[in-house]
Amino acid sequence: MLARAQGVSGELVLREHEGRREVIAGGVFLMDTSDGRSERLLVSGAVRPGGHVLVGGLGVGSSLQEALDAGAAHVTLVELEPALVGWHREGLLGAASAAALTDPRVELVVADVIDVLGERPGAYDAVCLDTDNGPDWLVRQENGALYGDAGLATALAALRPGGVLALWSAGPSPEFERRLRGLAGGVRREEVPVRRGEPDVVWFATAP
């Protein structure tokens, strides 16, 4: 074990396992540094160069780094857990993510992302959400509100005209996708094969 902290939603543990860093939340696997393809796709498929993007969930830093590499002019990074931010700043999840947090384009907000979205309607060219393991596999039960109709409507309302809402999941969710299609102007689904078997899924939705 590399670090342990009491988080907003329970105990957080950072450990090294088989050459990768893993974050465990409340005894449940949440993220690791082994791949990152789907987390980068979450952002690359939504961000416009020169735009303002909200990234919900710092994770292991892949999404934040992709937003900067994709040419975002301003990145609002929203993370609920102060301990996770601290581990990045200390370099425990890699030098690249520690440097990304100090990039002048990055505005760090330590808060619940649904609160931030509700405060800033029409503010973003893209909203990229990776705040849990997906709508059907919640580590933090309170995150279910984000995947409900009201939460999705709030996220879509935070977009500027033509903006894109991107959502990450550790697996398909036909019922969630059906509801998202009913709320958004258009929805595209992409799948990324992963070694555990079921593919990661990213949905890209445009404001109605």
Image (cartoon, grey):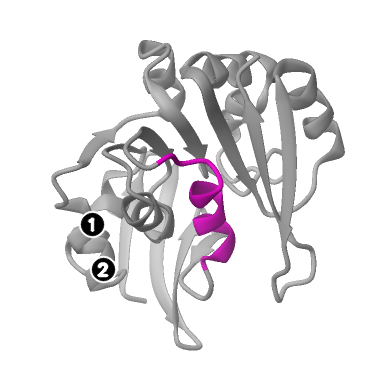
Residue 55 x, y percent position in the rendering: 41, 40
Q: Is residue 198 left or right of residue 145?
A: right
Residue at 64% across / 37% down in the picture?
Answer: 204
Residue 149 x, y percent position in the rendering: 69, 17
Residue 131 higher or lower than 64, as above or below = above
The residues colored magenta run 36-48
Residue 136 appears in the picture as rendered? no
Residue 66 higher or lower than 80, as above or below = below
Residue at 21% across / 69% down in the picture?
Answer: 91
Between 194 and 165, the one lying in front of the other is: 165
Q: Secondary structure at mark 2?
A: helix
Between 126 and 167, the one lying in front of the other is: 126
Using a 10 Å C-alpha cutoff, classify the residue at mark 1 as few (fewer than 14 neighbours), some (14 to 19) or many (20 or more): many
Residue at 43% across / 53% down in the picture?
Answer: 63
Locate the C terminus by quadrant. Answer: top right
Q: Which residue is disc 1 drawn over? A: 100
Q: Which residue is disc 2 drawn over? A: 96
Residue 151 higher or lower than 36, as above or below = above
> Residue 199 appears in which quarter of the rendering?
bottom right
Q: Are marks 2 and 1 in contact (CB under 8 Å)?
A: yes
Q: Is residue 38 magenta?
A: yes
Amino acid marked by disc 2 = Ala
**Alpha carbon separation for disc pair 2 and 1:** 6 Å
What secondary structure predominates along the stretch shown in magenta? helix
Amino acid marked by disc 1 = Ala
Between 123 and 196, the one lying in front of the other is: 123
Q: Is residue 131 magenta?
A: no
Number of marks in picture: 2
Residue 127 x, y percent position in the rendering: 47, 32
Mark linked to residue 55: none
